[in-house]
Image (tube, grey):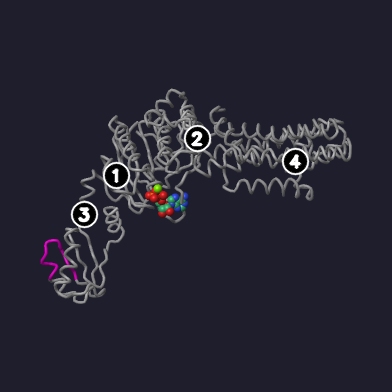
Amino acid sequence: MYDPTVARLTYRALLGRRRALILGALPLLLIVISVIVRALVGADDQTASDLLGGLALATMVPIIGVIAGTGAIGPEIDDGSVVYLLSKPLKRPTIIFTKLIVAIAVTMVFSALPTLIAGFILNGNGQQIAVAYTVAALVSSIAYAALFLLLGTVSRHAVVFGLVYALVWEALFGSLVAGARTLSVQQWSLAVAHKVAGGDLVTSDVGLPTATVLLVVVTVLATWYAGQKLRSLTLAGEE
Amino acid sequence: MTTLQIDHVSRWFGNVVAVNDITMTIGPGVTGLLGPNGAGKSTLINMMGGFLAPSTGTVTLDGQQVWRNEAIYRHIGIVPEREAMYDFLTGREFVVANAELHGLGAKAAQQALATVEMEYAQDRKISTYSKGMRQRVKMASALVHDPSLLLLDEPFNGMDPRQRMQLMDLLRRMGDEGRTVLFSSHILEEVEQLAWHIEVVVAGRHAASGDFRKIRRLMTDRPHRYLVRSSDDRALAAALIADPSTSGIEVDLAEGALRIQAVDFGRFTALLPKVARDHGIRLLTVSPSDESLESVFSYLVAA
Ligand SMILES: Nc1ncnc2c1ncn2[C@@H]1O[C@H](COP(=O)(O)OP(=O)(O)O)[C@@H](O)[C@H]1O
Ligand SMILES: [Mg+2]
């Protein structure tokens, strides 16, 4: 199911110079903002929760997820180099699963880790806030990576669609329309975070059982479907 | 695993018919797939390599379906037309990765690099390679697992003469070893120099098949039809029919033109202007009348 060579190629493509810069910029921004806020406001649980929820979980995690998820396969399909993977006796789902693992790992490192650091800077993990949002970031990394890997497999405009989903649906639409929140990776991961933090600083519109089921279903379905799509991926001429 | 069977294969994109009901068998040795740009060569090769589903028909390798059958790649090596590779790797890293994906190790990779004579640059990044070097590394990646079928799409594009010679030698060697080697090209000379057997594809259709002598003959000796308008069609007809290079002339009253069938292409094209000049006839139109094949063949011969 997991091919170390596919993983190595994917890591190197993802962490190539330009993409690594983009991946690193947002986490750095989060940490800088946290330092400034802490200096200005001091350690405040509500502020910490607002910043981690609004900036880290609602914005940074999905954007990192888009970059890592679509970037794990999209560019290869676009430029045709995926032919070197496809012309091998490798099961297509193995290729997808391996790329999923890489995308998850990269998303976690570049989003959950900075979230934890920012949380400690903001209020020293008071009321478990840093840990709770870190867990949410870890959980949502999995679902985002799977969703955006699928998007990268089926669309040439995956990054654009991914960003629209991440910013418009998750961040904007989700905060305006109640129904949209039930179908939001962010809310599902908040349900898990709520369980970790307890109290009412970290809350979700979705119950934990529903959230867990939806997270698992979305991740599994997206991965399965991407594998099917790759099986019948056609490489045509350059047009 | 050496006989590739293409059986009544068609492929269309929307309403563009890229490949139109082609049936051919490709066996051991070097086969050239010849046709002008847009003829459908890449589409055909993509279907042979299992990267594109035929709209109708089947492609099989020794009886096994190629499409959606990843196990078949144990026997197939592919050199794609497109440039993109993993440019951030060195040549050696790239070929080793390809070997690993076949379940092989660094030794197989090293051997393939030696075969294409790329050891001297194997530790440089692919992004620094010339077109010919890239082509050779692609070739090494296609050879790591010692495949019995090798598919190459326009492998000589952009190569200098020396690189071209080297690759031709290599492909010849592969053919001599009993492998099935199929390459595409839009240049007749290239195909003539290398291929034992030629398949000609024109506008999606299978136009001809045979060794290069047969193809040459087909292109130059087949009857050519021309539509000619002149200042005095009757006098021109009378003068032309006397020459053996002209096998038939028909006066088309509706068109106001002559339909001429010429058997000796070279001789006829020299004769026509000379006869016109000698008889003081002005030629108004001279056009090949079965356009697609005619123009394609003259294009291929001239290239
Ligand atoms: N993906 C595609 N979508 C639409 N048309 C295509 C596609 N690929 C090829 N074609 C068309 O099919 C025909 C054959 O193309 P191709 O196989 O690339 O020819 P060749 O390789 O001989 O130059 C051309 O008319 C081309 O425009
Ligand atoms: Mg082509």
**What residue is shown with label 2?**
B125
| Amino acid type at mark 1 | Val
Q: Quadrant of residue A96?
A: top right
Dot 3 falls on which chain? B
Residue with the mark numbered 3? B220
Mark 2 and mark 4 on one chain: no
Disc 4: host chain: A
Q: What is the secondary structure assignment of the residue under circle 1?
A: helix
Q: Position of residue A214 (x, y in %)?
A: 71, 37
Q: Are marks 2 and 3 in contact (CB under 8 Å)?
A: no
Left or right position of B268 against B84: left
How far is mark 2 from mark 4, CA to CA? 33 Å
Q: Amino acid at mark 3?
A: Thr
Q: Please tell me whether residue A139 belongs to the stretch shown in magenta.
A: no
Marks 2, 3: nearer the viewer = 2
Dot 1 or dot 2, earlier in sequence: 2
Percent across and percent down for residue B92 are 47, 29
> Which residues are drawn in magenta?
B239-250
**Residues at circles 1 and 2 in contact by the CB criterion of under 8 Å:** no
Q: Name which residue type carries label 4.
A: Leu
- Local packing at callout 2 (Cα closer than 10 Å; few below 14, some 14-19, many 20+) is some
Three-letter code, disc 2:
Lys
Left or right side of A124 for B169: left
Q: Residue B29 at what x, y percent from top left?
A: 28, 35
Check disc 2 and report its element: helix, strand or loop: loop
The circle drawn on residue B80 is: none
Which residue is at the front of the view, A227 or B145?
B145
Q: Of tags 1 and 2, which is closer to the observer?
A: 2
